[in-house]
Image (spheres, rainbow, N blue to C red):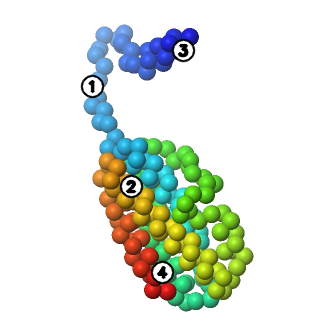
Amino acid sequence: MCAAAVALLVVGCTAQPTTSGTPPRATASRPSPFNATDTAWILLMIPMAERARQLTDLAPSRSADPAVVTLAANTGSTLRTDLRRLRAALKLSGVPDTRPHEGHNMPGMVSLDTLDKAAATKGRPFDRILTDALRAHFTQSRVLCAGEQNQGRADEATGLAAAIAKTTSRHIAGLDHL
């Protein structure tokens, strides 16, 4: 039974002969330069950046420290740029944005609970939530970017990972300075 189903799938997925008498057009289908690591990295980095950006957007109305507000504004700007570039890379990869990590809480990802606590907090407690969450985000982002750079194949994705890793290091230095 399984063999018959597999055989039907194989027949259905192969080119069928044409009956018009004209040969089928020769189309050179190039394999995607994106491998599974590239697309998995992109699909994970998008929600991570989105959540971190949501947190930074809270800073102007919740922070007690102008330096934290400035750090959050700079980080938010970088995250918006990263998100545009990540979405462009995903589109280029041809993989649909199925949002497989929607609602997940993973290492380094700002959790929904953290966002709720931050939104309900002001002053120094907010600043601590923001800086702790951003440090975890940046630390995990560097790990993920290193994995992409080592195992990814598409220049668009590996180059973006290198750029994000570089800015991530700069943002960690900013947190250390606070």
Q: Amino acid at mark 2?
A: Gly
Task: Determine the residue positioned at 51% across, 79% down.
Answer: 73
User: Which mark identifies residue 26?
Assistant: 1
- Marks 4 and 1, the one that precedes in the sequence: 1
Between discs 1 and 3, the one toward the N terminus: 3
**Mark closest to the chain's N terminus, 2 or 4:** 2
Q: Secondary structure at mark 3?
A: helix
Q: Which residue is mark 2?
A: 147
Q: Amino acid at mark 3?
A: Cys
Check whether the beta carbons of the residues at disc 3 and disc 4 lie within 8 A of each other. no
Give the residue pinned by disc 4.
Answer: 175
Disc 2 secondary structure class: helix
Q: Which mark is residue 2?
A: 3
**Is 138 on the left or on the right of 62, as rendered?**
left
Tell whether label 4 touches label 2 (CB within 8 Å). no
Whichever of labels 3 and 2 marks the residue nearer the N terminus, that label is 3
Q: Is residue 53 visible?
A: no
Residue 164 on image: x %, y %:
39, 65
| Mark 4, other Cα within 10 Å: few <14 / some 14–19 / many ≥20 | some
Q: Position of residue 124 (x, y in %)?
A: 64, 86
| 4 or 1: mark nearer the eye | 4
In-front residue for pair 127/79: 127
Outermost residue toward the right in this view? 120
Q: Amino acid at mark 1?
A: Ala
